[in-house]
Amino acid sequence: MDVDRAHQCIRELCRHVLLVEDSILIALDAEVLVTDLGAERVSIAASVLEALRSLENAPPTLAILDVKLEGETCFPIADKLQEKQIPYAFATGYSDKATFPDRHKLAPCMTKPYNEQALRRVIEELIGGADQCGIQRLQQTG
């Protein structure tokens, strides 16, 4: 895929990003990062319930999920994203995916704190291997 097509795919995938993060400072930093990558809309949810409501009201084109949220995990959100075939990646302060449910072990994962380069890598991984996460592969033309 050429560079222009890759940038176009990143912008398309980042049209509406759902950030699930219970730390407002990390969420605001992440919002700046995804906006810099071309996000037109960013929704922030701090809990599983808030994120599931957001998914129903305005489904995103991409979701970034903090694994641990105030006494709960994000895996119910990831299940719903898989069901809706919406690309997602995990962000965590822990690097051990061994504790992830098997159905989510192939999803991309970033270690927090993450930067634009890590976010871009995860998005490129989603573009190139979306079907590994239980979602449809993005169409590549050109």
Image: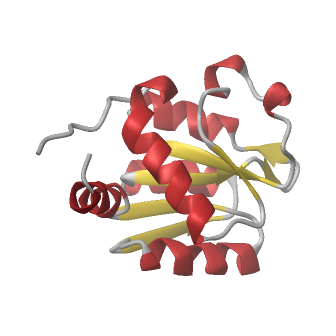
At 54% from the left and 48% from the top, the residue drawn is 52
Q: Number of marks in the image?
A: 0
* Picture quadrant where residue 113 is located: bottom right
Residue projecting furthest to the left: 142
Front residue of 59/120: it is 120
> Residue 4, relative to residue 62: is it above or below?
below
State the residue at coordinates (48%, 31%).
82
The percent position of residue 41, horizontal first and vertical second, equals 37, 72
The residue sitting at the front extreme is: 2
Find residue 25 and report its horizontal and vertical position in percent.
Answer: 74, 80
Q: Where is residue 8 in the image (x, y as percent from the top left)?
A: 24, 61
Give above or below for 94 relative to 29: above
Tell me the quarter of the image containing the C terminus: top left
Quarter location, residue 37: bottom left
Pick the residue in front: 50 or 73: 73
Relative horizontal placement of residue 32, taking residue 27 as reference (left or right): left
Asked whether 20 or 55 is in front, the reply is 20
In percent of width and height, residue 121 lies at: 54, 53
Report whether residue 140 is seen: yes
- The relative height of residue 35 versus residue 46 in the rendered view (above or below) is below
Name the residue located 58 percent from the left edge and 54 percent from the top edge. 64
Confirm whether residue 53 shows in the render.
no
